[in-house]
Image (cartoon, rainbow, N blue to C red):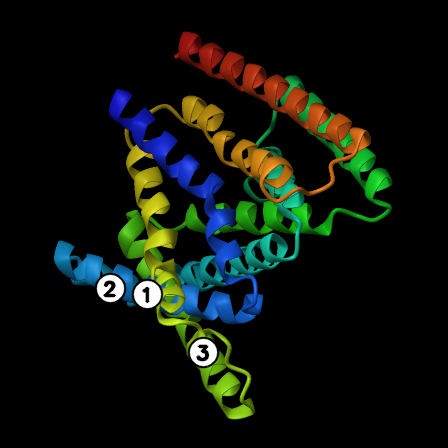
Amino acid sequence: MNSGLINAIIAYVMWGILPLYWKLFNDVPAGEILSHRVVWSFVFMGILVAIQRRWSDVKRIWTSRSTLLSLTASGLLIAINWLIFIWAVNNGHVVETSLGYYLNPLLNVLLAVVFLHEKPNRGQWLAIAIAAIAVLIITIDYGRFPWISISLAASFGLYGLAKKKIKQDASVGLLSETAVVLPVALGYWIYLGIVGKTTAWTLPAPMFFELLLSGVVTALPLLFFARAAARMPLSTLGFVQYIGPTIMLVLSIFVFKETVSPVLLVGFAFIWIALVVYAIASMRATKLAKSMS
């Protein structure tokens, strides 16, 4: 349990400070950053899988049609999530990225209802209703629908849904997912070279080396998260996950100096209330299930 908690904290702190890393490449278009993230993640994970001698597990995945379809879906969804996140950070929308990851666990409940036919209890439905009020408040404050937040929450939620059908550890799974979108990333490199719009390759050597590390930056928190998930209860892990968006919110206010209106803070307050209600309802449901078993 203690080992799992330490791994979870490390993973979510890494995810929380990730905007600081992507801000280093403010002058590079989000699509180009994404292509490098995919390629270098594939390279790093390939080296890691080779060290672990797990190539037989990778081959087994690619011989299963159903697994391959799930991998294609999860690979595309996580690439979409990465693209939106990078674009949002580098265009001054870190507050909205924070909101997206606060909304994610609540949206997961709706996805479970629609796709897995699960039945939330009253407390969980109440949490979803409170979150919906929060989105409405934030929409009114923005004067527009918070599409960045909803898109991040939806893409990551659907990614988790696709991952449920793939029984593989983090390293093998991430290598396979990046392999799915690797041809698109390489094709985009070729396109940028043809039209003469490459930006990343013209970066100063130290900064380009930092971009090469995007594979490590992507993989490490996922690997720590996988170790945490195997060592601690899901309910506890659910609480720890709010470290990430909380750090993002703090960075957006105090480091990136984004404007946060009082109405927006009210919206976030409703989100936090919803999360507390959801956590309490989930813990009660878990205790009830244990007492009946």
Asked if the residue under mark 2 is in contact with the one under mark 1, i.e. CB atoms within 8 Å, the reply is yes
Please state which amino acid type lies under the numbered disc 1. Phe
Instruction: Give 253 or 230, whichever is nearer the viewer.
Output: 253
Q: Position of residue 145 (x, y in %)?
A: 79, 48
Side of 62 where 288 appears, left or right: right
Q: Which residue is mark 3?
A: 202
209 shown above or below 145: below
Q: Which residue is mark 2?
A: 46
Instruction: Give 265 or 253, whichever is nearer the viewer.
Output: 253
Numbered disc total:
3
Instruction: Specify few, some or many for label 1: CA neighbours under 10 Å numbering under 14, 14-19, or 20 or more.
Output: many
Q: Which residue is mark 1?
A: 42
Secondary element type, mark 1: helix
* C-alpha separation, residue under disc 1 versus residue under disc 2: 6 Å
Secondary element type, mark 2: helix
* C-alpha separation, residue under disc 3 versus residue under disc 2: 26 Å
Q: Quadrant of the C terminus?
A: top left
Q: Position of residue 126 (x, y in %)?
A: 70, 21
Residue at 43% in and 49% down: 163
Instruction: Specify few, some or many for label 3: CA neighbours under 10 Å numbering under 14, 14-19, or 20 or more.
Output: few
Please state which amino acid type lies under the numbered disc 3. Thr
Instruction: Give 126 or 31, whichever is nearer the viewer.
Output: 31
First in sequence: mark 1 vs mark 3: 1
Q: Position of residue 287 (x, y in %)?
A: 46, 11
281 shown above or below 150: above
Side of 159 where 253 appears, left or right: right
Q: Viewer-nearest of labels 1 and 3? A: 3
Asked if the residue under mark 3 is in contact with the one under mark 1, i.e. CB atoms within 8 Å, the reply is no
Q: Position of residue 119 (x, y in %)?
A: 60, 28
